[in-house]
Amino acid sequence: MGPLKRLSIIASAAMWLACAAQGARGGLSVGINFVGKESLSFATMGSSEWAGVQPQTFWNNATGGSGSLSSLLNSAGGATAVAASWRGDYGYLAIPNDPGNRRLMRGYICKLGADPATVTLTGLAAAFPAGYDVLVYFDGANQGTAWAADYGIGAAVVRGTDAANTDFAGVFVRDSGAGGNYLRFENLWSDAFTLSASPLAGSGAPINAVQIVHTPEPATLGLAAAGLAAILSLRRAAPSCRRRG
């Protein structure tokens, strides 16, 4: 067996081990889709629809501006001890009502008068015993006005900016300070938390969906990095097809 063939096998094995490690950890997620008013948004998702930055099925549909749900389903359709309650007004985004990501982003909750929209989740420890990340999806009907809001969980506060004249077009963009349509809170451990969305003056603060996912293990990330490094080495070692000399 030649060295390039061996390197290819090593690279593939490293990536497979990374995926296996993540799977062994139990990579099930829990997602909440804020429908708002169904007769306006038509954003209720079917159990088989795939959506999200970490794609999953069995999104839990939360209707109305305020309400609660218990025994939320995970991404495999299993009931969990996770419960959710939310409070706010509601709105919807006039984008194509295609199954999946676009439907996930059509409905949202937002501030109620002067009060920020809030989402409280409980019972997380049993579903995510090794910690979790929270993905917050946001995109409102802001048209020609940019919206900026502070999204907070406990002491962690992250600013999200919904750019003017930019409706969700099927691609998720993490807001790292220049605008986007989702934020990520990392390495959380508490059994319960409350997410708040506080708009800056003249802005809105939509919450279209919330997704709780397992925090990637350092070993998993290390294996993935090893696989990537091996692949890059393979590319550098590959003979050129160009004629030299």
Image (cartoon, grey):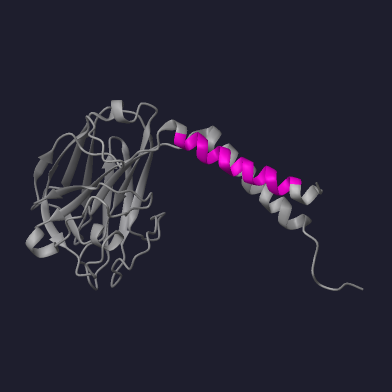
Looking at the image, can residue 221 be seen? no
Rendering quarter of residue 199: bottom left
**What is the magenta segment's predominant secondary structure?**
helix
The mark total stands at 0
Horizontal side of 234 relative to 177 (left or right) equals right
Q: Which residues are magenta?
A: 6-23
Which one is nearer the viewer's eye here, 105 or 89? 105
Q: Is residue 34 above or below residue 225?
A: below
- Image coordinates of residue 218 in percent, x first then y, are 53, 34
**Which residue does the image show at 80% across and 61% down from the upper left?**
239
**Which residue does the image show at 38% across and 49% down from the upper left?**
54
Horizontal side of 194 relative to 67 (left or right) equals right
- Image coordinates of residue 190 in percent, x first then y, are 30, 28
Which one is nearer the viewer's eye here, 71 or 144? 71
**Which residue does the image show at 36% across and 26% down from the upper left?**
129
Q: Is residue 106 above or below residue 2?
A: below
- Image coordinates of residue 154 in percent, x first then y, are 28, 35
- Residue at the far front in the pictured view: 1
Rendering quarter of residue 202: bottom left
Q: Is residue 7 magenta?
A: yes
Q: Quadrant of the C terminus?
A: bottom right
**Which residue does the image show at 78% across and 55% down from the upper left?**
237
Q: Is residue 38 magenta?
A: no
Horizontal side of 172 relative to 193 (left or right) equals right
Which one is nearer the viewer's eye here, 135 or 45? 45
Looking at the image, can residue 74 be seen? yes
- Image coordinates of residue 162 in percent, x first then y, are 29, 62
Horizontal side of 143 relative to 180 (left or right) equals left
